[in-house]
Image (cartoon, helix red, strand yellow):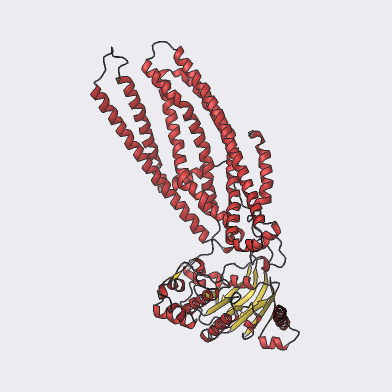
Amino acid sequence: MPLRNFSLVEERLAKYQGHFFGSTSGVPPKEETKDLQKGKADEISEPLGQLVQEEEREKGRVGFPLYWKYLTTAYGGALVPFILLAQFLFQILLIGSNYWMTWATPVSKNVKPVVSGYTIIVVYVALAVGSYFCILARVTLLATSGFKTATLLFNKMHSCIFRAPMSFFDSTPSGRILSRASADQRAVDMGIPSQVGAVAFSMIKLLGTIAVMSQVAWQLFILFIPLIAACIWYQQYYIPCARELSRMTGVCKAPVIQHFAETISGSITIRSFDKQSRFQETNMKLLDAYSRLRFHYAGAIEWLCFRLDMLSSIVFAFSLFFLISFPRGIDPAIAGLAVIYGLNLNSLLVELIWNICNMENKIISVERILQYMSIPSEPPLVIEENQPDHSWPSHGEIDIDNLQVRYAPHMPLVLRGLTCTFPGGKKTGIVGRTGSGKSTLIQTLFRIVDPAAGQIVIDGINISLIGVHDLRSRLSIIPQDPTMFEGTVRSNLDPLEEYTDEQIWEALDKCQLGDEVRKKEKKLDSTVTENGENWSMGQRQMVCLGRVLLKKSKVLVLDEATASVDTATDNLIQHTIRQHFSNCTVITIAHRITSVLDSDMVLLLGHGLIEEYDNPTRLLENKTSSFAQLVAEYSARSNSSIEKFTTLNYKAL
């Protein structure tokens, strides 16, 4: 591939990238926006921007600070001088052993040996043993340094990801994270340490080869100067193309991983709607776009290697010509040694340039990992000077003052100045149409999203002034999608091992799961598979209820907790909450409107504003109220569904 056309290639690939990679899951842009925003889009009444942004990538040459950061990550770079020293000693001993054999071995039978055969063997073995220990030291130190560096970068990246705010995960598809944690981390684990070492070792070997050849005839330096200059020129000409191709390859690998993961997780749905061909077509487009970059990358490598091979062959041919043309005063044995080293000059030169270029291409993986080491972090877990009392919250009163929330600076407000009070020890229901801001209010309460303006005060403490751990550990929530982790019943109810078995059994009995667990052979140590697949949806929701029963928080949030369960389980959850959380502040986001009719207060949201906030009985008495109309619509839909179901069954009979 002619490198002068790279700008055209990059421009063309950028078009493909904008078409395919802006949609990381491979679905058309409109559908992708719905899927990726997952609940955030329905919170925004007038979406002005896209939540998921195109993946950023660095441009231009890789600077020395990046190499320095990598070299000094492990032990402050203290092992690097020892690694280079071991390689220098090895190269000296290697050249010394070859020179020793050349000097000490007689040219023919008629020539008397300079030293005895025993001495030749002893010295040669000593040099070989010394070389062995140098290689052992070099490999050990390099492996130690590389392993330590990879471990530190991996742990730091994962720590930053785990502490990242929820907005990061909203705007970053999982494929981008997986790409850095797999492909880039593999390069840091296996490729970069050996590549950085290979550059240093190749350079030392090349210097040794030039020194040996120059020992015979210093005139060979005349050939090496233009050779080195030409190699540097080729390397500088090749590396911008290869570097950008490597970065683009890393960027376009994420959509392939993302689409593959989404296809696997949604395979049942895809087959149900007979959309296999659509996903196969999208997968092929993403793979073609990725393979296109890999092809150009491989072509650029071949372009460089061909020219370096030709250049080295020409220089070696001239070197041989000079050695043959020189006077007879040159020792034939030394000249032969120089020729042998000269034969390796070709491969050494190609190896050095190739290692330098490959190192710069692979070091981009460190660059990409460092990007995720600098992502913004959540607020501190604990703020020592603002730690609340252990009894907080004791009453559970929640004051909301002019609360304004948006998911990103470039996006519109979702909550537009809410002001209200949730009385302590009372049950408050939050209702509203899709996109009204119900879930956003709860996310702000847990500081998953920080407000753009306004504040939330719980029992006199502004939640924005305390650590997120202090806040979240004092609140409880039963989410719409219950979560169980692989392990045991005990570890899912009490992951931090804070409660006794008696307390756990008491919580299980309260949520009507005690008998079910007792039937199992291992009782509390019964196995729970990944995502709780061996438990039904209703049982998983009851396990979540058991967690909050153990925790005994003063504030409980039900984020449409009964939306995915049957009516019987819904009634059981509501009964348990009424019985055991009568003195707690209970905030319910309702999926079934009947779930909030027994609440003390009902908050009706619309387009991020408070439309109504009053006792549900008074709101229902006012037939013109929005809440009364919402209940009437729900009742009409329910009756219509029952009539339609009855009609279909009657026709079937």
Q: Residue at x 43, y 21 (%)?
A: 339
Quarter of the C terminus within the rendering:
bottom right
Q: Nearer the viewer, residue 131 or 60?
A: 131
Corner quadrant of residue 176: bottom right
Q: Residue at x 52, y 47 (%)?
A: 365
Residue 374 visible? The answer is no
Number of numbered discs: 0
Q: Residue furthest front?
A: 653
Counting from the top left corner in percent of width and height, residue 496 is at: 43, 70
Counting from the top left corner in percent of width and height, residue 539 is at: 52, 76
Corner quadrant of residue 636: bottom right
Quarter of the N terminus within the rendering:
top right
Classify residue 219 as left or right of residue 295. left
Classify residue 19 as left or right of residue 224. right
Q: Residue at x 44, y 23 (%)?
A: 342
Classify residue 126 as left or right of residue 651. left
Q: Is residue 153 above or below residue 202?
A: below
Q: Is residue 460 above or below residue 169?
A: below
Corner quadrant of residue 478: bottom right
Counting from the top left corner in percent of width and height, residue 431 is at: 66, 78
